[in-house]
Amino acid sequence: MRKFALLVLVMAMVAVTVLNVNAQDDPYAGVELDGTTIVWWHQYNGGAQLETMDALIAEFNETNEYGITVEGLNQGGYGEIREAMNAAIIAGETPNLVSGFQNDAASYFIDDAALDLNPLIASEWGYSEDELAGKNQAILNANVFPQYDGARLAWPNQVSANVLSVNISMLAELGYEELPSSPEAFVEVACAAAAADDINGYPIKPDASNFESFLAGFGGTIFDAEEGRYNFTSEAAIATLQLYADLYNNDCAYVPDSRFGNTDDFAIGLNPMALGSSAGIPFILGGMADAGYETEWTVTTTPYTEGNQTIQVFVPSVIVVPATPAEEVASWLFIKYLSETEQQIRWTEATSYFPIDLDAAASLTDFEAENPFFAAANALVSSPDVNVYTSPPLLSYGALRGVIGEAVADVTTNGLPVEDVAAELEEAANELYDDLEG
């Protein structure tokens, strides 16, 4: 059973909000939209993503019945968008839509530059309960913020998952017939690979997302919502840091020398397992093709203790910036258009990002047959037996990511004691929380 207790509570809060808005006057009733133009600052800078999104924008502009025009403008990567948006907030010249993560939405919200979408969803322009139920609730709820009374501050548009790529052929050569599902089996495979000729053990990235994926497999989270504090001294957090330390200290792991060195090495047969975003699967396939390396492989979750098989989902989203009622409705209608089944299928087939529309997900049979690695990842995201984990929707999380990465380096290459590192990480995390969330 999925561990969505907090999310269920949030959804209950949201449901009350929707009912109350419906029972009262709709703040968006009768809004005139003719000729409304909205600007979207996004991160798409080339390839299939930009080509597909430009086509979807053009079609929306041509076909919507309200004369709405969307102008999509690339503003660089997420960091550059964040800098541009913060400058725009100060200058009072913001776009109508901006791409970002949950911590971005929280930051903009406290500056009155992110709109709660719940009233729009409940308005005459929004969704009925049945229509909303046709979307993946676990993914949608990543953008619900309990600390802001259940406000929904963004809408997903580029969903991927952190998956463990496993070289099945290499495992067989090492004497293993099954994927390493438990932490113990995972360590055994990594050590066997490190002891073999011409291949390495597990590639450790000092990365917050990978840390959280392992942590979730031990049944933990990095933030205690009831206490309102980060927790890195929990049993699960200690077990995760100890796993890293043991792998490294026993020469069963190494630290790659480049950002994507773990999956790059996997693509040319230099390690048996590598953890990374499902969005990177095409790059692994490309690396294998370039190297002429053929092998049987698949994707799965990080190892887990009993009842804790978990898939971490990444949910880059679109944030609506408060503006005139017409601009807010126009922005919402464009987001809603992108979320429709037909557009979701096109987006997934062009980019391999997961759809949030359930009908779209069920219509990808042919695509999944041609893309078995996407199919395997999508099956994990959709499975009722696999928990879904998302990073906490906190303003402080963006700054914390680098601190987590430093902690991973401390217990591996720097050789510091796990308990000391965990305590220092927890203290630093909560200092960030107090500074930024207070």
Image (cartoon, rainbow, N blue to C red):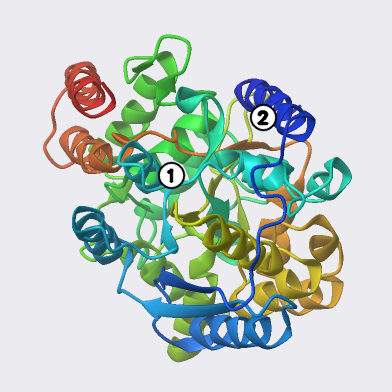
Residue placed at 17% from the left, 17% from the top? 420
User: Callout 1: few (<14), some (14-19), or many (20+) C-alpha neighbours within 10 Å?
Assistant: many
Which amino acid, by three-letter code, is at mark 2? Val
Q: Is 365 situated left or right of 246 in this image?
A: right
Residue at 66% x, 68% y: name it: 338
Asked if 182 appears above or below 269 in the picture, the reply is above
Q: Which of 425 and 70 is in front in this view?
A: 70
Residue 105: x %, y % from top left: 40, 46
Q: Where is residue 233 in the image (x, y as percent from the top left)?
A: 32, 15
SS label for mark 2: helix
Which dot marks residue 30?
none
Q: In which quadrant is the N terminus drawn?
A: top right
Residue 73's image quarter?
bottom left
Judge whether 341 appears above or below 422 on screen. below
Check disc 1 and give the amino acid type: Gln
Residue on which the image places disc 1: 102
Give the label on residue 14, or none.
2
Whole-percent x, y for residue 9 in the image: 66, 20
> 317 or 392: which is nearer to us?
317
